[in-house]
Amino acid sequence: MTDRIRIATLQYFIRPVQTFEQFRDQVEALVETAVDYNCQLVAFPEYFTVQLLTLGNLKRPIRHQICDLARQSPRVQELMSDLARRFRIHIVAGTLPTRDEDSDSIFNECYIFSPKGSWGVQGKLHMTRFENEDWIISPRDRLRVFDTEFGRLAIAICYDVEFPEIVRAAARQGAHILVVPSCTDDRQGFLRVRYCAQARAIENQMYVVHACTVGSLPMVPAVSLNYGQASILTPSDFAFSRDGILAEGNPNQEMMIVGELNLKTILDTRSSGTVLPLLDSRDSSTISSHVEVVPL
């Protein structure tokens, strides 16, 4: 396993497109730029594929439009797989709605592609209200940890990062990088994700890579506005960046944020840091199962 990797995370600008090729060109240019900066991984945000909705009839009910977007899933997967192989880079390919052939349900899925052509997928585990009530997106029920050439990596899609036990389980399986693809329409939503991402970095002594959508699609409900600031977050200890922020973008601008992760530092701090929250959490489940309510 290599000690250092350079990664890129995106503030991906959502804009209307007239053809799938326009979308492809935007995505390919970003991957090529990450390669120009010698990155081994690039992270796209949640629902960056919604700009493909502008290829269809925007007057239809949004749940029908989401079903149409799910039909684009094989095409987007093929694009990302090709880019990963062609440019020899790992791609955490944001998320897109996908339809399950057996249940006919729609899920919010994040694919990760390796330079060798292999791939994995992490489904979103917890739905926000608009996903559940308006888009009719169903949750997955399986957390995965991906074994890469630079070590183990997990993905928490937007709202999922607000559930500490999910990320703690991945950290206990050896994940030292967490990628958080998100799509938030206002500052409050963004800060819920950002603050929780920072907490997960501290309590699990891991790097957290946050990718965001920016820009506007006024004609598409729930993503008519986007508020985002991509970042690379670290534990809060002497070996890491001040304030636990390795790099971050300027809010709401189209940007690529690049940073270099020292993976040996993560392993060292888990065993010899100023505090050892991941190690010391081994008794937390026992403690939390015996809560006493004390009358006063």
Image: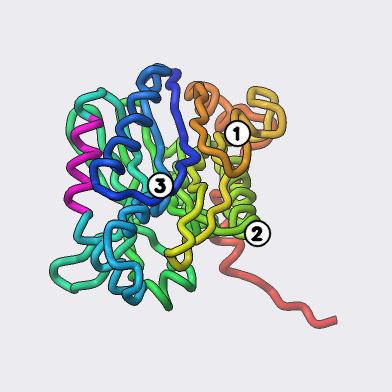
Q: Magenta segment, which residues?
A: 73-84
Q: Is residue 247 above or below residue 95?
A: above
Q: Earlier in the sequence, mark 1 or mark 3?
A: 3
Q: Is residue 133 left or right of residue 121?
A: right
**Separation of residues labelled 3 and 2 (CA atoms):** 22 Å
Name the residue at the front extreme.
18
Q: Residues within 10 Å of mark 2 (few under 14, many from 20)?
A: few
- At horizontal 40% and vertical 44% (from top left) the residue drawn is 154
| Labels in figure, total | 3
Name the kind of residue labelled 1 in the image. Answer: Glu
Q: Is residue 84 left or right of residue 38?
A: left
With 131 as the anchor, is 90 left or right in this view? left
The residue under label 3 is 155
Residue 248: x %, y % from top left: 60, 33
Query: Residue 66 at x, y = what percent?
Result: 31, 66
Residue 230 in the image, given as x and y percentages of width and height: 54, 40
What is the distance, in whole Å, between disc 1 and disc 3 at their CAs? Answer: 19 Å
* Nearest to the observer: residue 3 or residue 10: 10
Which quarter of the picture shows residue 29? Answer: top left
Query: Which residue is at the far bottom?
Result: 295
Reply above or below: 134 against 152.
below
Quadrant of the frame with the C terminus: bottom right
User: Residue 188 shows which numbered tag?
Assistant: 2
Magenta span: helix, strand or loop, mainly?
A: helix
Front residue of 74/288: it is: 74
